Amino acid sequence: MERIKYKGYFIDRTEHGFRICKEDNTKIHTHLRNLTPSYKLIDNVVGHKIPTRCGLYYIQSHTHLADNEEYKQRLQDYYNVKLNKGKRQTYYNPAKKKF
């Protein structure tokens, strides 16, 4: 198994992607499919940055690896906003006839 050490975290190669965990506590971990987002996730967690234009699972992954309670709360608030946002309504043109 290939193990990469990056900024106090381990990135382990798994069968279907990568497993990211802390050096001091390997039980707390998250899984991602690609290596580049794994590096970006670690950079965001170390710098306490909130990712934009990403999915809900990626935000949850940040929450799993974060130590700072204030940062975790900000991530959870952002997650709830994205979860409650919902999908946009599709435009319906009543004048257009369907055949």
Image (tube, grey):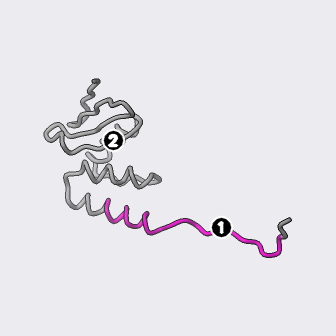
Hey, which residue is sitting farthest front in the picture?
A: 99
55 to the left or right of 1: right
- Which amino acid type corresponds to the residue marked 1 in the rendered image? Thr
Picture quarter containing residue 91?
Answer: bottom right
Residue 16 picture location, percent across and down: 39, 33
Q: The N terminus is located in which quarter? A: top left
Whole-number angstrom distance, CA of label 2 to CA of label 1? 34 Å
Residue 20 picture location, percent across and down: 28, 38
Q: Look at the image and give the residue range highlighted in magenta.
A: 75-96
Residue 79 picture location, percent across and down: 37, 61
> What residue is pinned by disc 1?
90
Residue 15 picture location, percent across and down: 36, 30
Residue plotted at (28% across, 33% down)? 11
Residue plotted at (30% across, 37% down)? 19
Residue 88, magenta (yes or no): yes
- Which amino acid type corresponds to the residue marked 2 in the rendered image? His
Mark 2 lies on a secondary structure that is strand
Q: Is residue 72 above or below residue 88?
A: above
Q: Is residue 31 above or below residue 14?
A: below
